Image: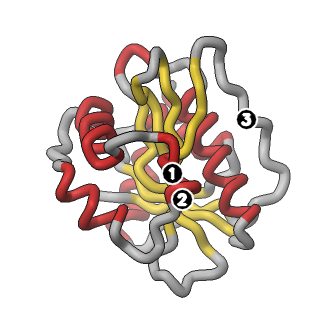
Amino acid sequence: MNILMTRPNLCDLPPVIIPEGYKLVTACEIENLPAVWSRAINEAFGDQNWTEEYVLQEFITREQFDPAGAFFILYEGQPVAMAFKWRDTPEERVTGRVHYVATVGDHRGKGLGRAVVVTVLNSMREHGLSRAVLTTQPYRLPAIRLYMSLGFEPTPRNEEEQAAWQEVGEKLQAR
């Protein structure tokens, strides 16, 4: 189950901090983007089975895809963190979606997820969007903690999500 979070505005964003040894780039700077992107997502999540064809069909060839709004953090030339700006419809002019925030294994806990999310939020603001949403899973507590620290709020859409958010809140308080 996916649960929704909303950042009601794009004001007061923190600075983007890229740790030493890492480099922030856009999809415009990635050669063979479908292959690189699918491999990075599969490595970061482990439970995904993205193919190059899937990346092309679901994202890159869609009208709302903006390669300058898809961000990757590289380490030794390899993508180790990523997120991208998305509009649920090409006509959307208010709300942007922070999509597929991912950090690869050994690079977790170094602030890379924060850096790509803040970069996406800045890109949204620069392109005239005024609020942001994202979806995540209830078991991704470190990610939820990060999103909340960046001003995202739980936004349950139904009773099932309300119950999931209740459980997430209890788990976050217990830690």
C-beta proximity under 8 Å, tags 1 and 2: yes
The amino acid type of the residue labelled 1 equals: Ala
- Provide the residue designation for mark 3: 16
Label 1, on which residue? 70
Q: Which residue: 44% across, 73% down?
A: 157
Residue 169 seen anywhere in this rendered image of the structure: no
Classify 62 as above or below 150: below
Which callout, 3 or 2, points at the residue further toward the start of the chain? 3
Q: Residue at x 32, y 66 (%)?
A: 160
Drawn side of residue 81 relative to residue 56, left or right: right
Q: Secondary structure at mark 3?
A: loop
Residue 71 in the image, given as x and y percentages of width and height: 53, 44
| Residue type beneath disc 2 | Lys
Q: Is residue 77 left or right of residue 146?
A: left
Residue at the disc numbered 2: 85
Q: Quadrant of residue 127?
A: bottom right
Q: Amino acid at mark 3?
A: Val
Q: State if disc 3 and disc 1 touch (CB < 8 Å).
A: no
